[in-house]
Amino acid sequence: MKIRLTKDLCYLAGTQACWKGEASSIGICTSNAELQQRFISLLIGLGVKPEKIKVSKSCTICYNSRLAKRLAKIRQRSLKIFSRISDKSLSYIAGIVDACAKQTKQGISIRLDRQSTLLLELLGFHTRDGYVLNLGDFIMLIKPYSLFLSSIRTPGNERDPR
């Protein structure tokens, strides 16, 4: 059975940007229960049996080598697949933000690898030292797809109807 590239699959591929587990596993480490629930529901929606998902207080891990290889392939080809702004590319970036972002005094800090930084630059989001420089535009585009950004209030965008 071939898995088609969907928004949910792109989101899961994005969450693997910060995952440092085994090659045959998919996981996310967060204290946000909402994010863990979304991760689990996406895995079950892709056909993973609930017995294969291990949930602890801070990490959720799934051992499915076929899905892990598919997500790794999407991550390797991300610069070609997500070269333009679309629902799939925004879902992919939202997965990266949900898995790797923290709010600091200077703004939103995202732990990015070189490929993710290049992808953000390609899509028009300028970064420096892990910070997105044009934060207002970034939040307006990614907010409908991201759990992390939907919970953050940033000054200056209260009156913007977008």
Image: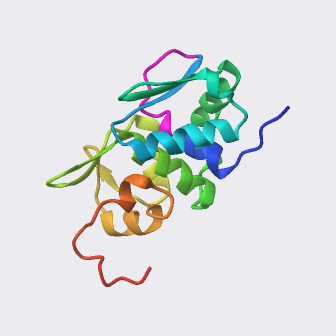
13 versus 98 height, above or below: above
- Magenta part, dominant SS: loop
Which quarter shows the C terminus?
bottom left
Tell me, yes or no, whether the highlighted magenta stretch contains residue 76.
no
Residue at position x 66%, y 37% from top? 44
- Residue 26 falls in image quadrant: top right
Residue at position x 21%, y 72% from top? 155
Residue at position x 36%, y 42% from top? 32
Q: Position of residue 10 (x, y in %)?
A: 61, 45
The residue stretch that appears in magenta: 13-23
1 versus 140 height, above or below: above
Foreground residue, 135 or 100? 100
Residue at position x 52%, y 45% from top? 38
- Residue 19 falls in image quadrant: top left
82 versus 58 height, above or below: below
Q: Position of residue 125 (x, y in %)?
A: 40, 58
Q: Position of residue 150 (x, y in %)?
A: 39, 61
Q: Position of residue 103 (x, y in %)?
A: 24, 51
Foreground residue, 67 or 72? 67
Which quarter shows the N terminus?
top right
Tell me, yes or no, whether the highlighted magenta stretch contains residue 19.
yes
Foreground residue, 28 or 130? 28
Residue at far left of view: 105
Is residue 132 among the parts visible in the rendering?
yes
The image's colouring method is rainbow
Is residue 80 among the parts visible in the rendering?
no
